Image (cartoon, grey):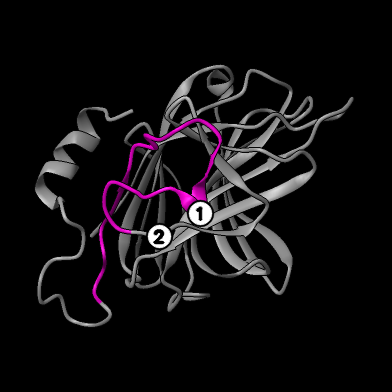
Amino acid sequence: MMGFRSSIFHSVLFGGRPSGAPPGSLDPVSDTFTDTNSTLLSAHTPDDGGPWVNNAGDFVVFGNRALPSTDGLDHISTIDTGGTDLTATVDVHVANNARFAGGIVFRFVDTSNYWLLRIQRDGSSPAQVRLIEMTGGSETVRDTHDDESMGGTTVEIQVVVSGSSIIGKLNGSTVVSYNSATHASATKQGLENYYTTGDFGYIRHEFDNFEVTT
């Protein structure tokens, strides 16, 4: 649903890419995920920008939020924003569970090469904001921030990238950072969520008010 932050963004940038925008400049994105329940994200039209592409798994819209629908997969959906230096923000309704993993995917090249700003808990370990680099299918955690208060709540996460600088924020406060030019030319940003069920299942997050701005 459209919150205060999204409604302002939408009113200023309605219509998506500005007329006469030069090639390679950012195409702003805003999505409140307002649509018929069970609509595939790839069939859903964002408020601004788009389209969504399901790169792995299948996100759907349900209850005016985006969430993964299929058990047992790492779900990734992205939008090609045309730009590399940007701010990506989303509200995450965090699962109240011992295991969860999902957040913003950015500088996405393919399913083996991208960056993540992820909210994650692995069983008895603390809930964390993690800044993750994925290169050649190998995952490296570059920075972490512990915050046990996230489970069962709604938080805002934001990634700010400019050149080699990568900053991750939780509810407006910087909590993780790293400097790297890896995948710096990639222009796709979006959502990621690992979702499985069973005794050691990772419960899905729900996402709302996704934005990409300069």
- List x then y, in percent, for residue 86: 30, 61
- Residue at 48% over, 51% down: 43
Is residue 95 rendered magenta in the image? no
Q: Is residue 159 above or below residue 125?
A: below
Left or right: where 128 falls relative to 90: right
In terms of sequence position, does the residue under pointer 2 or pointer 1 come before the other?
1
- List x then y, in percent, for residue 16: 21, 58
Return the residue nearer the eye: 18 or 165: 18
Q: Secondary structure at mark 2?
A: loop
The C terminus lies in quadrant: bottom left
Q: Which mark is residue 79?
A: none
Quick check: marks 2 and 1 in contact, CB under 8 Å?
A: yes
Residue flagged by tag 2: what amino acid is it? Answer: Pro
Return the residue nearer the eye: 209 or 40: 40
The N terminus lies in quadrant: top left
Q: CA distance from mark 2 to mark 1?
A: 7 Å
Q: Is residue 68 above or below residue 206?
A: below
User: Which of the 4 image quadrants contains residue 204?
Assistant: top right
Residue position marked by numbered label 2 in the rendering: 51
- Residue at 24% over, 74% down: 25
Is residue 47 rendered magenta in the image? yes
Residue flagged by tag 1: what amino acid is it? Answer: Ser
Q: Residue at the far right: name it.
A: 199
- List x then y, in percent, for residue 123: 79, 27
Left or right: where 178 falls relative to 17: right
Q: Is residue 2 above or below residue 167?
A: above
- Residue at 87% over, 27% down: 198
Q: Which mark is residue 42?
A: 1
- What's the magenta region? 25-49
Left or right: where 191 falls relative to 200: left
